[in-house]
């Protein structure tokens, strides 16, 4: 069924093959027919809303808005499926989708406005009440515009207003009292400062007199102290001179005794060194004699060993050619042993 309410005809469809264009139109025609079926109900609600909006009408508007919204939802689903085709088909589908969505959106918005009529009116009432209460309360508090005043019942707000008014009046009274107390306090402080100034002048004069007398007494004590220090200094010098002479005599005595002890120690040391030298010379002569005797005895012993040494060398020479090995590893090992035997024979000759 064709509809005069929504015409499914876009420039994008004109560029497609007729069969493709017809196919796209037929895909979306059920959505257009569904939208047309709601047209009568929509027009009726809009006309009635101009006269009066009732609770029953808001419910009808909500129901119709949800039903019409299904057209947009179903259109979106079809659009998503059709967009899987080639690019031109996608553009054509989007064009048809936009037409249907635009047609539905306008009706949805109008129906929602009717549906939310009482909520909107209530919101306007709350905003007006908030503005009026802010204006009244701002006389007494600075943050009235930051408070949610519309939430209060009338008696609650009036109580709050009275409380804030009383607080302001009490604050003004307290500030006035504080100002009076400040003036009285400043007057008392001025009188106290004058009393303190006069008392300070009296104390200053008394202090100056005490200072004058103290200066005279200090000068007297200074003279006495200077005489005492002079006397003590003379006694100290006399005492130190006596002590110095006694100390010098004592140190001279100690130095003479120390020099005598050092002389005796030097003589004793010279005697010990002479005795030690004689003992060392004797021990060295005995040691040399013992070494000479040991060499002589060893030479006598070596005369009997010479034949044995020659037999040892001969036996070692035989070992150098006694064995024959087949493997290269053992051959190299035997060559190393032969080399070591040569070194051993050389060592025997050098001893």
Image (tube, rainbow, N blue to C red):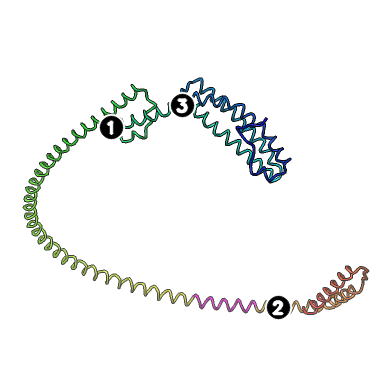
Q: Quadrant of the N terminus?
A: top right
Label placed on residue 162: none
Q: Nearer the viewer, residue 351 or 11?
A: 11
> Residue 104: x percent and y percent?
58, 33
Residue 293 - label: 2
Query: Mark 2 against mark 3, which lies toward the viewer?
Result: 3
Q: Of callouts 2 and 3, which one flags the residue occurring earlier in the amino acid sequence?
A: 3
| Residue 141, image x, y percentages | 30, 33
Comes first in the chain, label 1 or label 3:
3
Q: Residue at x 51, y 78 (%)?
A: 274
The quarter holding residue 188 reads top left
User: Which residue, given by chain and number where applicable, does mark 1 sit on?
Assistant: 140
User: Is 54 on the left-hand or right-hand side of 27?
Assistant: left
Residue segment shown in magenta: 272-287
> Residue at coordinates 40% horizontally, 76% vertically from top-left?
263
Q: Which residue is mark 3?
A: 119
Specify few, some or many for label 3: CA neighbours under 10 Å numbering under 14, 14-19, or 20 or more: few
Given residues 49 and 261, the one toward you in this image is: 49
Q: Residue at x 34, y 23 (%)?
A: 156
Spatial separation of the CA atoms under disc 2 and disc 3: 141 Å
Rendering coords of residue 252 (x, y %)? 30, 73
In this rendering, the answer to whether 155 lies above or below 31 is above
Give whichever of discs 1 and 2 has the lower sequence position.
1
Q: Residue furthest top?
A: 56
Query: Could you tell me which quadrant the C terminus lies in?
Result: bottom right
């Amino acid at each position: 069924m064709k509809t005069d309410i929504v015409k499914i005809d876009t420039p994008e469809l004109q560029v497609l093959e007729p069969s493709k264009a017809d196919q796209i139109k037929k895909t979306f025609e059920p959505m257009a027919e569904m939208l047309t079926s709601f047209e009568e109900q929509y027009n009726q609600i809009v006309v009635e809303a101009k006269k009066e909006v009732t609770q029953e009408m808001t419910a009808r508007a909500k129901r119709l808005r949800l039903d019409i919204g299904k057209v947009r939802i179903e259109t979106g689903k079809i659009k998503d499926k059709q967009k899987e085709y080639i690019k031109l088909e996608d553009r054509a589908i989007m064009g048809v989708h936009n037409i249907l969505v635009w047609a539905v959106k306008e009706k949805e918005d109008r129906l929602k406005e009717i549906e939310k009529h009482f909520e909107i009116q209530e919101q306007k009432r709350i905003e007006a009440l908030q503005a009026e209460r802010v204006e009244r309360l701002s006389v007494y508090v600075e943050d009235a515009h930051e408070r949610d005043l519309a939430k209060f019942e009338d008696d609650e707000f009036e109580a709050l207003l009275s409380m804030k008014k009383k607080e302001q009046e009490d604050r003004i009274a307290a500030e006035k009292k504080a100002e009076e107390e400040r003036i009285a306090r400043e007057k008392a402080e001025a009188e106290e400062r004058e009393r303190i100034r006069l008392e300070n002048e009296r104390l200053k004069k008394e202090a100056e007199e005490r200072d004058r007398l103290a200066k005279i007494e200090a000068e007297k004590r200074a003279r006495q102290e200077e005489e005492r220090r002079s006397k003590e200094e003379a006694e100290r010098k006399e005492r130190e001179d006596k002590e110095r002479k006694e100390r010098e005599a004592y140190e001279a005595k100690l130095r003479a005794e120390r020099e005598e002890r050092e002389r005796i120690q030097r003589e004793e040391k010279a005697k010990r060194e002479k005795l030690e030298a004689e003992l060392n010379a004797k021990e060295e002569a005995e040691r040399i004699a013992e070494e000479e005797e040991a060499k002589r005895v060893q030479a006598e012993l070596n005369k009997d060993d010479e034949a044995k040494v020659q037999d040892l060398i001969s036996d070692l020479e035989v070992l150098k050619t006694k064995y024959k090995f087949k493997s290269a590893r053992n051959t190299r090992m035997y060559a190393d042993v032969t080399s070591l035997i040569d070194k051993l024979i050389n060592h025997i000759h050098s001893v």
